[in-house]
Image (cartoon, grey):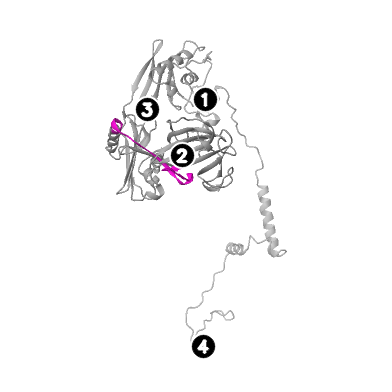
Amino acid sequence: MFLREQPGIELAGGAGTRSFGRALVPVKDLGVYDRLRVGAARVDWVPDLGAQIGSLTWWRGLLTCTALCAGAILTAPGLRPVSGYVTPPLSGGEYDEAQTLSIAPIAYGASTGRRMAANDLVRPLTETPERPVIDLTATLGDGDSFGAALQRAGVGRNDAAQAASLVADAVSVGDLKPGTVLSLTLGRRADRSIARPLEHLAFRARFDLNLALNREGDALSLDRQPIAIDRTPLRIQGLVGSSLYRSARAAGAPAKLVEAYIKAIAARISIGRDVTAADSFDIVADQARAATGEVQIGKLQFAGLDQGAKKLQLVRWGDGDGTFWDAKGQSERRGFMGMPVAGRVTSNFGARMHPLLGFLRMHKGMDIGAPYGTPIYAAIDGVVAFAGRNRGYGNFVKLNHGGGIATGYGHMSRIAVSPGTRVGRGQVIGYVGSTGMSTGPHLHWEVWKNGVAVNPRSISLSSVAVLSGATLRAFKAKVANLLSVKPGSH
């Protein structure tokens, strides 16, 4: 430590100790320039004008700020306009040519590629020249006619009529499906006032047939182009698992085919109660595969369910849509008794007080009140065993359904069937009336099982048919063909 009071003396230890170390060297005096530089460095040239207001430092800072602003104003060059050049707007051909070279959205008229702008040598045409030929397509709409579709596409009336006549020789024009695409080629015409001639027309008339029309001179000719079709049936097998529907869909069966399969087997067994996860389903359906790659799935032909010890095999048989028969050649139709007339039940089966006789008596049927003349329907398929007047029943019809089951319908106003005729379920057999011992228009509906009257609501009816002879042999041949199809033939 150095003491300001004794400059040049170095102390260490005590008063009587010997001095040690180096002696201080005197500093050289600074020149005028250096003193000014050091003094200027010590000056605060940017004092805070918000602090020490009114002090010497503050006034010096304000004077410095004012001097700097005055110097900037005095040395400013002043505001003078800068000359420039504005490009005149383009017009006419110059604008068209520049537009092709600019970068702009197509919505603003931009185009691609450089095009020659019109100049004085260009002469406008009196009319735009037509294309030699026009290729286009037309689509048949729902309820549309073949000729109308061609005329909308620009084909003349005579050509459209001739084309429709030629197509009708190959297929029924009315059978063409909506959505059919017509590919047309219209040729050159001599005058704008007439329609273009039809040079070529091609479309798919059926799944297995393409048709083409070509012009030969002044007439059209038809060219049939058959498409090879593979009609090997589709067979799909698999385990039922947690869901019969989802398992069949996962195996590749279309939704409508699965629905038809479930509907077929549901007529024989209960899907929810009788079908288990370990059972196997077997589906065979019509299939058509065109050489062009399209595939069409047709009707369900075989519905099988393998439950181990028990197998259910149903085969479609019969004209039209047909019905499903057991693989042994039997067809069974089941169903609970439905209401044969639209009305309300006025008296149920059982003992009751007779409305006319006035004493307790067994009511062997069910009374259904309905307006006079309401149609009465057969509860299930059967044969008319009796149709006529029957004492207290009035006009009465009795149907035999097989298996010891028979039904009767009384108090009719009019009978619509005759004895010995076969009736189907839901067929009208008569009309509501009040004949016989009746207090008003209603139907007395009675059901017998082995000759004993039973409650109509408690019985389930079924009808069984059996094939025989040549029909059974043809049926067996169809079953063998369906079962010979290999699974996965799709």
Q: Looking at the image, is mark 2 or mark 4 earlier in the sequence?
A: 4
| Disc number lying in front (2 or 3) | 2
Q: Which element type, helix, strand or loop, lies under badge 4? A: loop
Residue drawn at (50%, 40%) of the image: 445
Q: Looking at the image, is mark 3 or mark 1 earlier in the sequence?
A: 1
The three-letter amino acid code for the residue at tag 4 is: Gly
User: What residue does disc 1 label?
Assistant: 97
Membership of 337 in magenta stretch: no
Q: Which residues are magenta?
A: 447-472
Q: Looking at the image, is mark 1 or mark 4 earlier in the sequence?
A: 4
| Disc number lying in front (1 or 4) | 1
User: What residue does disc 2 label?
Assistant: 407
User: Does residue 217 appear in this view?
Assistant: yes
Q: Which mark is residue 207?
A: 3
Q: Looking at the image, is mark 4 or mark 3 earlier in the sequence?
A: 4
The three-letter amino acid code for the residue at tag 3 is: Phe
| Disc number lying in front (2 or 4) | 2
Q: Which mark is residue 14?
A: 4
Crowd rating for badge 3 (residues with CA inside 10 Å; few <14, some 14–19, many 20+): some
Label 2–label 4 contact, CB within 8 A: no
Q: Disc 2 to disc 3, how far (Cα)?
A: 49 Å
Label 4–label 3 contact, CB within 8 A: no
Left or right of 62 in this view: 393: left
